Image (tube, rainbow, N blue to C red):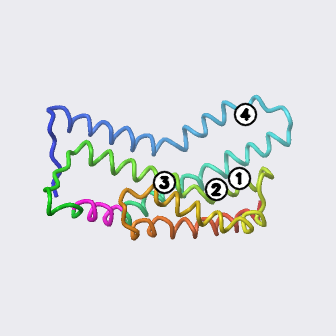
């Protein structure tokens, strides 16, 4: 299915939107580093500075790797299923003809959402590192986590079919388990 464009400038601005999003994703580690470097001088306690420096150094790289893993998983596994389902949904009633702007907006939003969702283990580790949570608490809340994971999967998944929801929920369950393991090291 080849996308169409309806307005004279639609394709032109879609190129800019994609370029801005890709540029933002590539520059995100540097942007985060600059934000954290701006905050660093406000810290006076040497222990606080040490923890903050460790957060900057050891949080940026895993965060970037997890984000890119989420984007890759979405692009390779989820997007083909979602687009196939959406293309065939209601095909007997109307022919699908997606505009390039709406198609790219959908794809970029989906990729960004899955990239952010894959940050779960890092967030859990930071929660344990700051003392807000422990690995035991995460284990004791596993039932709630499963419900929350399936709720997030239902929201993030662009289609109403259960297959796509399970495709989102399965790696999230594994990431929750990875977060528990990482929390033990915190």
Q: Which mark is residue 126?
A: 1
Is mark 4 in CB contact (under 8 Å) with mark 1?
A: no
Nearer-the-camera pick, 88 or 18: 88
Residues at marks 4 and 1, CA–CA distance in whole angstroms: 18 Å
Classify residue 154 as left or right of residue 8. right
Q: Which mark is residue 112?
A: none
Q: Residue at x 14, y 63 (%)?
A: 92
Residues at marks 3 and 2, CA–CA distance in whole angstroms: 12 Å
Nearer-the-camera pick, 122 or 33: 122
Q: Which mark is residue 115?
A: 3
Looking at the rendering, in which quadrant would you find the C terminus?
A: bottom right
Numbered disc 3: secondary structure: helix
Residue 51: x and y, percent?
78, 46
Is mark 1 in CB contact (under 8 Å) with mark 2?
A: yes
Name the residue that disc number 2 marks: 122
Q: In terms of sequence position, does the residue under pointer 2 or pointer 4 come before the other?
A: 4
Indicate the quadrant where residue 32 lies.
top right
Q: In terms of sequence position, does the residue under pointer 3 or pointer 1 come before the other?
A: 3
> Over which residues does the magenta segment extend?
79-87
Residue 171: x and y, percent?
52, 68
Q: In terms of sequence position, does the residue under pointer 4 or pointer 3 come before the other?
A: 4
Q: Within 10 angstroms of label 4, few (less than 14), some, or many (20 or more) residues?
A: some
Is mark 3 in CB contact (under 8 Å) with mark 1?
A: no
Taking the magenta stretch, the answer to whether it contains residue 81 is yes
Classify residue 8 as left or right of residue 82. left
Q: Which mark is residue 40?
A: 4
Q: In terms of sequence position, does the residue under pointer 3 or pointer 2 come before the other?
A: 3
Q: Within 10 angstroms of label 2, few (less than 14), some, or many (20 or more) residues?
A: many
Taking the magenta stretch, the answer to whether it contains residue 110 is no
Residues at marks 1 and 2, CA–CA distance in whole angstroms: 6 Å
Numbered disc 1: secondary structure: helix
């Amino acid at each position: 299915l080849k996308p169409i464009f309806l307005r004279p400038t639609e394709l032109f601005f879609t190129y800019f939107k994609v370029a801005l999003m890709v540029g933002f994703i590539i520059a995100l580690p540097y942007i985060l580093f600059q934000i954290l470097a701006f905050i660093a001088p406000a810290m006076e306690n040497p222990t606080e500075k040490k923890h903050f420096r460790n957060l900057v150094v050891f949080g940026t790289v895993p965060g970037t790797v997890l984000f890119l893993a989420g984007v890759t998983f979405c692009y390779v596994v989820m997007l083909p299923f979602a687009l196939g389902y959406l293309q065939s949904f209601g095909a007997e009633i109307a022919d699908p003809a997606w505009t390039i702007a709406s198609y790219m907006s959908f794809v970029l939003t989906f990729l960004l959402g899955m990239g952010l969702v894959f940050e779960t283990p890092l967030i859990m580790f930071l929660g344990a590192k700051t003392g807000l949570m422990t690995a035991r608490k995460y284990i004791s809340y596993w039932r709630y986590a499963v419900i929350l994971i399936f709720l997030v999967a239902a929201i993030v998944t662009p289609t109403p079919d259960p297959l796509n929801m399970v495709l989102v929920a399965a790696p999230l369950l594994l990431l929750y388990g990875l977060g528990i393991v990482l929390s033990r090291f915190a």
